[in-house]
Image (cartoon, rainbow, N blue to C red):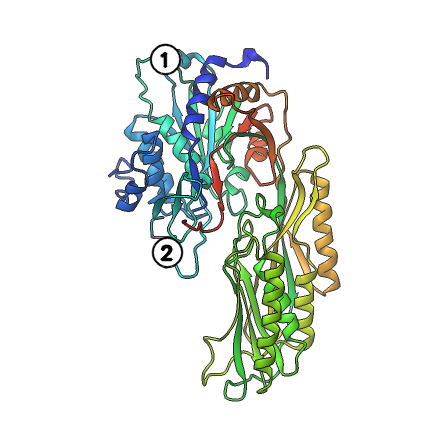
């Protein structure tokens, strides 16, 4: 971008402030909203205790407040209402589009008021995952923060048994902290006009970015700072596109329902896995609970008197499955010890393959909660069970190709994200497998999804491929990139050169650049976040 298009001194000040605001580490996991718009936000004492003495205070106060507002994807009304009230208290104007995206305008301060506006962007929703032993209602309960020290002596911030929501709560908090700058500040601060864009429903399909109405929102900035990456000291200039595919396999069950008086209903469980982000962590070889469960169930079904009733696992399209379970019907007395022996073999194999990384891997055979005197669903026919398990084990999972241009960058991947199925008797039972495919090359993305179609066809399944979203092509000649590298190097005290990377994840940048007309200079940065889409283990 030509230097005449913006004032470098204003961007220098803004970017420098944001680098201070986002240099903290986040582990992944009494104010009204104005004008009677919403209720008072009640911040638990734990949250204020966790951020005590952290700087910048304004950023961490905002993060504690955001953590106290339930904000699952598609249920962002409360947090959007809070931001509106926040703006009104400071006499800042805001605009909202039909899908729910919100922009808050700040006129800047000092000589920066003369500069063209800069867009700050982050998303307000969060992935809602919790440990199986944690009682938490993401639609009602606040995220409870906890500060702790890791083995290396570093302070981290985590959540108690749930995802933290730092993705992208920390980016939203940084933007709000900047918006708190008094409009009439007569100090030597130099802040350009800000257009703080808060998008909705990013985590379940980039809905806010896809439906964004730039004209209704009054967005005019030609420089955008996205605050949604997770590695401090790195600047991101590109991201992968992605698309979801739903594979549906018709199932048949045996004609006669079994009863627990003449058969045992047991549950094969896989728990305790790391899970993680389906883009950022996909290359690390983390175990997939659905695949481990399917493999163990397939081995058990080779035994006499063992049938498959159901198998389910995973939850979110953008999270590697952490838990899965399969119900098995054992119709003779010899089946139980034989299946237990199979389980021991499967546990040993999984531990040998993943044990170094998956420290809390747990595979167990337990009596089903549905066991007793009641009848249970009829088991699947042998043909249906075989086709389902074979389909699962044939589908690709993990990194499919690495980039030839950028070292260590995953170019194309597939996440076998979740499996659900009906357990009702009848001919209309269907297993639904969700796959999330990513690639920085559009043709490679569709080629990988064509592979899914081919495998589904061989199993007698059909596939629904949702429209893919575009990636973000790097601009290595970006003026904001040049300035950010210089400022970040100073922030790092010149001990190392800031990295310039692309990310194998679905940032909103590609869609937003398209919605804003294409001629937008963009970089993305953020703090270090571990396990953004899975509950953190507080050490």
Eyeballing the image, is 93 above or below 149? above
Work out whether residue 43 or residue 119 is closer to the camera in this orientation and state it.
43
Q: Which residue is drawn at 57% across and 79% down?
A: 329
Give the mark count.
Answer: 2
Q: Which residue is drawn at 50% across and 42% down?
A: 202
Find residue 363 and report its horizontal and vertical position in percent.
Answer: 54, 66
Q: Residue furthest bottom?
A: 262
Does label 1 or label 2 sit earlier along the sequence?
1
Asked whether the viewer can see residue 202, the reply is yes
Find residue 198 and report its horizontal and vertical position in percent.
Answer: 44, 35
Q: Is mark 1 on a helix, strand or loop?
A: helix
Work out whether residue 281 or residue 256 is closer to the camera in this orientation and state it.
281
Relative placement, left or right, of 82 versus 341 is: left
Residue, disc 2 = 137
Q: Which residue is drawn at 30% across and 30% down?
A: 88
Find residue 474 and report its horizontal and vertical position in percent.
Answer: 63, 28
Quadrant assignment, res 454: bottom right
Work out whether residue 352 or residue 182 is closer to the camera in this orientation and state it.
352
- The mark found on residue 110 in the picture is 1
Label 2: few (<14), some or many (≥20) within 10 Å? few
- The mark found on residue 347 in the picture is none
Marks 1 and 2, Cα distance to the nearest angstrom? 45 Å
Q: Which residue lies furthest to the front in this view?
A: 152
């Amino acid at each position: 971008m030509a230097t005449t298009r913006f004032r470098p001194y204003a961007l220098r000040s803004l970017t420098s402030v944001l680098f201070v605001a986002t240099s903290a580490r986040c582990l992944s996991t009494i104010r009204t909203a104005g004008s009677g718009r919403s209720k008072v936000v009640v911040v638990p004492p734990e949250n204020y205790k966790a951020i005590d003495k952290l700087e910048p205070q304004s950023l961490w106060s905002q993060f504690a407040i955001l953590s106290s507002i339930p904000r699952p994807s598609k249920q962002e009304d409360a947090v959007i209402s809070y931001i509106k009230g926040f703006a009104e208290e400071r006499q800042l104007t805001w605009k909202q589009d039909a899908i729910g995206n919100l922009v808050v305008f700040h006129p800047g301060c000092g000589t920066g008021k003369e500069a063209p506006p800069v867009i700050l962007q982050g998303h307000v929703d969060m992935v809602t995952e919790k440990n199986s032993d944690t009682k938490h209602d993401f639609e009602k309960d606040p995220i409870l923060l906890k500060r702790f020290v890791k083995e290396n002596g570093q302070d981290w911030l985590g959540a108690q048994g749930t995802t933290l929501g730092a993705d992208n709560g920390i980016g939203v908090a940084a933007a709000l902290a900047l918006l708190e700058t008094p409009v009439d500040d007569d100090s030597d601060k130099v802040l350009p006009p800000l257009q703080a864009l808060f998008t909705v429903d990013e985590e379940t399909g980039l809905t806010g970015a896809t439906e964004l109405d730039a004209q209704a929102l009054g967005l005019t900035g030609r420089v955008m700072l996205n605050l949604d990456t997770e590695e401090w000291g790195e600047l991101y200039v590109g991201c992968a596109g992605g698309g979801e595919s739903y594979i549906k396999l018709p199932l048949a069950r045996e004609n006669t329902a079994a009863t627990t008086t003449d058969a045992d209903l047991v549950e094969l469980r896989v728990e305790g896995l790391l899970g993680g982000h389906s883009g950022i962590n996909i290359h690390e070889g983390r175990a997939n609970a659905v695949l481990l469960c399917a493999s163990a169930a397939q081995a058990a079904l080779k035994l006499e008197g063992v049938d498959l009733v159901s198998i389910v696992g995973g939850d979110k399209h953008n999270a590697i499955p952490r838990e899965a379970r399969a119900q098995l019907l054992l119709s003779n007395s010899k089946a139980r010890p034989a299946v237990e022996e199979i389980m021991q073999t499967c546990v040993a194999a999984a531990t040998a393959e993943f044990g170094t990384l998956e420290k809390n891997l747990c595979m167990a055979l337990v009596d089903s909660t549905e066991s007793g005197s009641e009848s249970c669903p009829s088991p699947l026919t042998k043909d249906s069970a075989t086709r389902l398990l074979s389909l699962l084990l044939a589908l690709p999972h993990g990194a499919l190709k690495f980039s030839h241009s950028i070292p260590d960058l995953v170019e194309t991947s597939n996440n076998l994200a979740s499996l659900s199925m009906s357990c009702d008797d009848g001919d209309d039972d269907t297993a639904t497998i969700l796959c999330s495919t990513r690639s920085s090359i559009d043709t490679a993305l569709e080629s990988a999804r064509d592979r899914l179609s081919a495998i589904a066809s061989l199993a007698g399944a059909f596939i629904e491929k949702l429209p893919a979203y575009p990636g973000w092509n790097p601009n290595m000649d970006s003026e904001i990139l040049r300035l950010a590298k210089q400022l970040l190097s100073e922030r790092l005290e010149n001990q190392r050169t800031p990295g310039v990377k692309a990310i194998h994840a679905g940032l909103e940048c590609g869609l937003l650049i398209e919605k804003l007309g294409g001629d937008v200079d963009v970089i993305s940065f953020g703090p270090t976040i571990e396990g953004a889409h899975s509950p953190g283990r507080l050490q």
